[in-house]
Image (cartoon, rainbow, N blue to C red):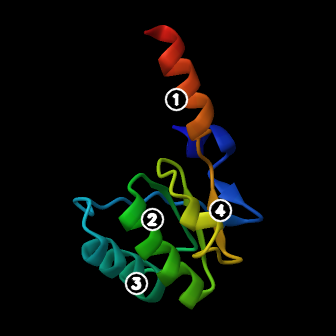
Amino acid sequence: MAIEDFGGSVLGEKIELVDADHQNKPDLASAIARRWYEAEGVDMITDINNSSVALAVQAIAAEKKKIDLVVGSSTPALTGSACVPYGFQWAFDRTGSRCRQAARW
């Protein structure tokens, strides 16, 4: 629906949504990312919600010079020790989350 709302294209190129189940397994996620980037022409992978999977996909994205946008993982390694120029992280603030949870109890 969002693709359709956006107009279905960017700079004259059609936007296409593909999906797969990595089953929270880094090796499977790496294989999917590699296939998408190498064989299927995918330019960006997003909605990666597990730290080990996110790190694995980010490594493949860096190797292929493609973009990965991590949405659910909050490992500091993504923007620290495993940081790459093609990886982006959209995550919550873990410290702030703990403070809010503590306040509710």
Q: CA distance from mark 3 to mark 4?
A: 18 Å
Q: Residue at x 33, y 75 (%)?
A: 32
Mark 3 and mark 1 lie on one chain; the one further toward the N terminus is: 3
**Residue corresponding to mark 4:** 88
Q: Secondary structure at mark 4?
A: strand
Amino acid under disc 1: Arg
Q: Which residue is mark 2?
A: 54
Which corner quadrant holds the C terminus? top left
Q: Nearer the viewer, mark 3 or mark 4?
A: 4
> How dense is the environment of label 3, judged by Cα within 10 Å: few (below 14), some, or many (20 and up)?
some
Three-letter amino acid code of the residue under disc 4? Phe
Q: Earlier in the sequence, mark 3 or mark 4?
A: 3
For marks 2 and 4, give the CA distance: 10 Å
Q: Horizontal and vertical percent for residue 69?
A: 58, 60
Q: Residue most toward the right? A: 11
- Of the image marks 4 and 1, the number of the one nearer the N terminus: 4
Nearer to me, 63 or 44: 63
**Residue 20 at what x, y percent from top left?**
30, 61
Place of residue 87 in the rendered image (x, y in percent of width and height, measured from the top left): 63, 69
> Which kind of residue does numbered mark 3 sit on?
Arg
Answer with mark 1 or mark 2, whichever residue precedes in sequence: 2
* Residue kind at label 2, given as amino acid type: Ala
- Taking depth in this image into account, of 82 and 61 the one nearest to the observer is 82
Q: CA distance from mark 4 to mark 1?
A: 23 Å
Residue 98, labelled with which disc? 1
Of residue 96 and residue 40, the one placed in the foreground of this image is 96
